Amino acid sequence: MKNTQPPIDNLQAQDATQHGHEIFMAEAIIEAQKAATLMEVPVGAVVVLNGEIIGRGFNQPISSHDPCAHAEVMALRDAAKRIENYRLVDADLYVTVEPCTMCSGAIVHARIKRVIFAALEPKAGVVCSQMEAFKQPYFNHEVEVISGILEEQSVKIIQDFFKMRRAQKKQLKKEAREALLKGAPE
């Protein structure tokens, strides 16, 4: 009978890799929390090269008045400045939410080796939700993809953020109604 299980050394290597992914994704989650404190959609990203974080970023298009200031782009910019090269060959990008079209293009142009993301983005994600952007034949670079690393934590941050935003909007509407009623003639 043929043994179909990988050797123990291979399993240990897989566990070590999983643990490494979780460590770097936890750093991306810290970046996402920074975005939430600015009332930005809480997405965070880190760029890792040779086991070291070389770039960090979080969503900030509203606060920076920059439509391109997504977490991934900010992390890519930070990494490129740090290594003084716009090509981030052999680097990995950890991001808390599946990248959008714009970010996927930037990832390809930066020559990121692998994208590791936590949570799917069913509406705007293009790595696997709406399309498989990195598998398009017209791209001149292939990007590996790993998903689901610390997914529950990332989903919770997003859900909590939008729950809080909905509560704020509801409160503002209530206050506006009360102000109208106070100002109405009796």
Image (cartoon, grey):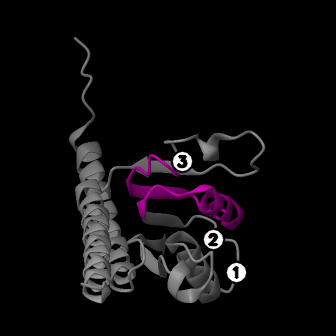
In the rendered image, which residue does mark 3 sit on? 127
Q: Tell me residue 39's x, y (percent).
A: 38, 81
**Which of the 4 image quadrants contains residue 135?**
top right
Q: Tell me which residue sits at (26%, 81%) in the image.
A: 181
Give the Cα distance between marks 1 and 3: 25 Å
Amino acid type indicated by mark 3: Val
The residue to which callout 1 is attached is 85
Given the current orientation, which residue lies at the most extreme front position?
A: 186
Residue drawn at (48%, 48%) of the image: 123
Asked whether disc 2 touches disc 3, contact meaning CB atoms under 8 Å apart, the reply is no
Count of residue discs: 3
Disc ID at residue 166:
none
Q: Which residues are magenta?
A: 96-125
Q: Mark 2–mark 1 contact, CB under 8 Å?
A: yes
Q: Residue at x 56, y 88 (%)?
A: 64
Please identify the quadrant where the N terminus is shown: top left
The image shows residue 23, relative to residue 62, as above or below, that is above
Q: Quarter of the image for the C terminus: give it.
A: bottom left
Helix, strand or loop under label 3: loop
Residue at the farthest top position? 1
Q: Position of residue 165 (x, y in %)?
A: 31, 71
Q: Please tell me which residue lies in front, 145 or 7.
A: 145
Q: Judging from the image, what secondary structure is the residue with disc 2 in? A: loop
| Amino acid tagged 2 | Leu
Spot occupied by residue 32 in the image (x, y as percentages of width and height) = 36, 75
- Helix, strand or loop at label 1? It is loop
Residue 88, label in figure: 2
Residue 169 placement (x, y as % from top left):
32, 73
Query: Compared to 10, does 164 lie above or below?
Result: below
Left or right: 108 in relation to 113: right
| Distance from the alpha carbon under mark 2 to that under mark 1 | 7 Å
